[in-house]
Image (tube, rainbow, N blue to C red):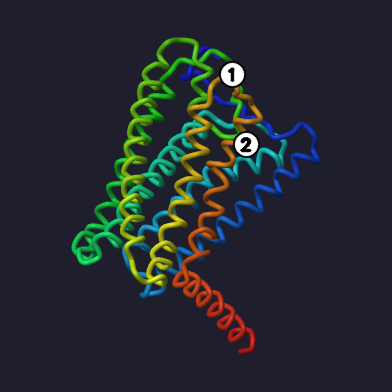
């Protein structure tokens, strides 16, 4: 194709050539997708319905679950359809929508994780000021700022990426439309503007990472000064899941985007993309509920209440 404006479709990377392996990939992705829907759906419903969880930490966790549902729904259903129907094609508009939604939801999730680090810092290091610094209005403003700024950020990335002339074919070496793989199809130096935007993005990501690290340095210093072992355990139980989620997203994403071309390969890119785009939304509910007794109790109450209502309606 001569340029981006004349493109009608792109070809995504096929997981396998044989029909049997394609079906294996379909069922594997279906299982992961259903686990993500169930886990995040339970967390959203439990937080919304249980008044004991109406606090800043759980408000941000609810937003995170919504973003997880959106991000995994952006990539996995199309990948499942491609494996099931043995097709690689994605329309130009569909590819642009996938880029926009993926950039928007993933960047908003990272911003929200940064806000959640601040929430834990205030809760542990400045507990007397928690209600003042993180009131309901402040929480809504911070969440709205994360969603709004990342929306415009995604618009800028998407418009810039799809304004670049493309002449290196239409095949993408990835199972979803990802900006670096689209830029590989460019035949001019106009991709440098998008490269500059990516550099600015990395600087912002690095700045947020430094903020998170400094926050947790202060948190650990404060936790180690808590005289009660039970108090230290409770503080760590609210921080460790957040740290695990941040590490999982950052390590895999940074390895993908900063990996030297000499060691890069299609299969390695595919594995790393699955690790940072598919796995976190599915395992985040498990990570956050594993060490959080309040959340586990709320989810269990929701499940038992649903079964009770179902049995009551069936007996009636």
- Labelled disc at residue 227: none
- Labelled disc at residue 271: 2
Under circle 1, the secondary element is loop
Place of residue 34 in the rendered image (x, y in percent of width and height, measured from the top left): 61, 56
Place of residue 109 in the rendered image (x, y in percent of width and height, measured from the top left): 41, 47
Camera-side residue of 230 and 60: 230
Is residue 193 shown above or below 128? above
Residue density around tag 2, few if under 14, some if 14–19, many if 20 or more, within 10 Å: few
* Residue 127 figure quarter: bottom left
Residue density around tag 1, few if under 14, some if 14–19, many if 20 or more, within 10 Å: few
Q: Identify the residue shown where x is 20% and y is 63%.
A: 129
Under circle 2, the secondary element is helix
Please name which of the two marks, 1 or 2, marks the residue nearer to the observer.
1
Pointer 1: what residue?
A: 262
Is residue 79 shown above or below 244? above
| Sequence order check, earlier mark of 1 and 2 | 1
Place of residue 280 in the rendered image (x, y in percent of width and height, measured from the top left): 53, 49
Is residue 191 shown above or below 238? above
Left-right relation of 283 to 141: right
Q: In which quadrant will I find the N terminus?
A: top right
Q: Identify the residue shown where x is 48% and y is 51%.
A: 244
């Amino acid at each position: 194709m001569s340029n981006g404006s004349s493109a009608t479709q792109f070809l995504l990377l096929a997981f396998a050539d044989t029909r049997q392996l394609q079906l294996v990939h379909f069922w594997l992705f279906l299982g992961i997708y259903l686990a993500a829907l169930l886990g995040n759906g339970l967390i959203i419903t439990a937080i919304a319905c249980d008044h004991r969880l109406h606090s800043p930490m759980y408000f941000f966790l609810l937003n995170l679950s919504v973003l997880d549902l959106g991000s995994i729904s952006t990539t996995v259903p199309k990948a499942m359809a491609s494996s099931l129907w043995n097709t690689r094609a994605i329309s130009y508009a569909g590819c642009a929508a996938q880029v926009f939604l993926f950039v928007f939801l993933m960047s908003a999730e990272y911003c929200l994780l940064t806000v959640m680090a601040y929430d834990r810092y205030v809760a542990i290091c400045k507990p007397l000021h928690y209600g003042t610094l993180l009131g309901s209005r402040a929480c809504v403003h911070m969440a709205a700022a994360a969603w709004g700024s990342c929306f415009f950020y995604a618009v800028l990335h998407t418009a810039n990426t799809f304004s670049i002339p493309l002449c290196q074919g239409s095949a993408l070496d990835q199972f979803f439309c990802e900006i670096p793989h689209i830029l590989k199809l460019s035949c001019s130096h106009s991709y440098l503007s998008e490269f500059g935007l990516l550099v600015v993005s990395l600087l912002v990501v690095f700045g947020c990472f430094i903020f998170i690290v400094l926050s947790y340095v202060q948190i650990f210093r404060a936790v180690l000064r808590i005289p009660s072992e039970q108090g230290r355990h409770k503080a760590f139980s609210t921080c460790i899941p957040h740290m695990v989620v941040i590490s999982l997203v950052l390590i895999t994403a940074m390895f993908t985007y900063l990996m030297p071309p000499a060691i890069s390969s299609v299969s390695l890119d595919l594995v790393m993309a699955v690790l940072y785009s598919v796995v976190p939304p599915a395992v985040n509910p498990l990570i956050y509920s594993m060490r959080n007794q309040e959340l586990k109790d709320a989810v269990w109450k929701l499940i038992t209440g649903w079964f009770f209502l179902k049995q009551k309606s069936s007996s009636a």
